[in-house]
């Protein structure tokens, strides 16, 4: 494999910051048993603070994967047998973040078009929306949340169209005296895949419910920290009939001698 990577950025007061990245990769150089593959990738970025609390960023990416040198022994073979490729991928995304009081709120979206000329069944269109917030107060309470929705449109008779929704919530309570931190955690992801004829090939629900507790011992024992974390995990697929709940529990005692060595 051999390659080249180049990047340039330019910041301006009026128009924001511009960036351009280029990557070239040659895989299977001097091929003998499969085709050489060439990858060219361009990425353009732009970001600009709209005001002291708001920032906007855009990103566009294009890539081309194609066949390079073909060994003489493979000239008469099909692309599937020789490893040939002719695939183009284009994506664009936008992200907006704004500080609202003690919280930072983010919103974003992405669209990706993948076109495979040699194997059209692999072509997909992927869309996603995401939102999140991070809250850090001067008191004891902190909060980190993320939510996303994704759609994938593919060959309706073979791969089908997929949809997934995921939610992540982690509130945190922190006390300096005593040095205690409590962090519950909830993550839930639900996904479905359906063929063009209406057949449901995938219907999953995955969840994790748990948290972590940390306590730095007081007085002469302040060189050590007790922590415990546990979770209940749910993994269910209604199409296959699978339902696998599991539980986990981990307790740790960490000691630091002279604040230099940790065991």
Image (cartoon, helix red, strand yellow):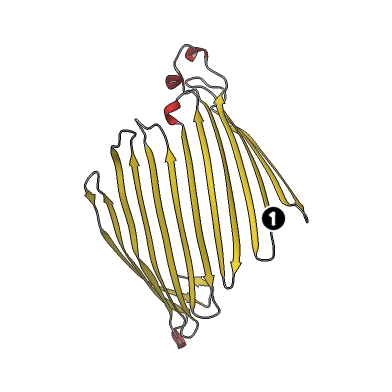
**Residue 22 in picture, x, y percent from top left:** 66, 38
- The residue carrying pointer 1 sits among few (fewer than 14), some (14 to 19) or many (20 or more) residues within 10 Å by Cα, namely some
* Rendered view: 186 above or below 41: below
Q: Residue at x 48, y 85 (%)?
A: 177
**Is 2 rendered above or below residue 200?**
above
Residue 254 placement, left or right of 206: right
Which residue is at the front of the view, 23 or 188?
188
* Quarter of the image with the N terminus in it: top right
All told, the count of numbered labels is 1
Q: Nearer the viewer, residue 118 or 230?
A: 118
Query: In this view, which residue lies farthest toward the bottom?
Result: 219
* Residue with the most extreme right position: 13
- Estimate the x, y position of residue 69 in percent, counting from the top left: 57, 20
Residue at 69% of width from left, 63% of height from top? 51
Query: Can residue 128 be seen here?
Result: yes
209 horizontally vs 153: left or right: left
Residue at (59, 50) in percent of width and height: 94
Asked if 79 appears above or below 41 in the picture, the reply is: above
Image spot of residue 183 (x, y percent): 42, 71
The x and y percentages for residue 46 are: 67, 49
Q: Is residue 238 left or right of residue 217?
A: left
Q: Residue at 50% across / 82% down in the picture?
A: 176
Q: Which residue is mark 1?
A: 48
């Amino acid at each position: 494999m051999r390659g080249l990577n180049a990047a340039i950025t330019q910041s301006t007061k009026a128009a924001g910051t511009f960036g351009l990245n280029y990557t070239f990769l040659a895989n299977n150089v001097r091929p003998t048993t499969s085709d050489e593959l060439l990858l060219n990738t361009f990425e353009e970025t732009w970001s600009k603070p709209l005001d002291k609390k708001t920032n906007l960023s855009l990103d566009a990416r294009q890539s081309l994967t194609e066949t390079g040198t073909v060994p003489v022994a493979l000239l008469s073979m099909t692309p599937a047998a020789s490893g040939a490729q002719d695939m183009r991928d284009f994506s664009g995304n936008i992200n907006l973040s704004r500080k609202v009081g003690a919280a930072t709120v983010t919103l974003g979206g992405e669209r990706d078009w993948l076109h495979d000329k040699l194997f059209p069944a692999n072509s997909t269109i992927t869309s996603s929306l995401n939102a999140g917030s991070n809250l850090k107060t001067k008191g004891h309470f902190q909060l980190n949340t993320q939510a996303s929705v994704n759609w994938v449109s593919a060959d309706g008779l073979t791969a089908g169209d997929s949809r997934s929704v995921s939610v992540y919530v982690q509130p945190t309570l922190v006390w300096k005296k005593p040095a205690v931190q409590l962090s519950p955690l909830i993550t839930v992801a639900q996904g479905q895949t359906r063929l063009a004829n209406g057949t449901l090939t995938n219907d999953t629900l995955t969840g994790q419910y748990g948290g972590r507790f940390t306590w730095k011992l007081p007085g002469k024992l302040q060189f050590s920290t007790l922590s415990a974390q546990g979770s209940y995990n749910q993994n269910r697929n209604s199409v296959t009939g699978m339902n696998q709940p599991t539980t986990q529990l981990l307790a740790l005692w960490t000691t630091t001698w002279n604040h230099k060595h940790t065991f």
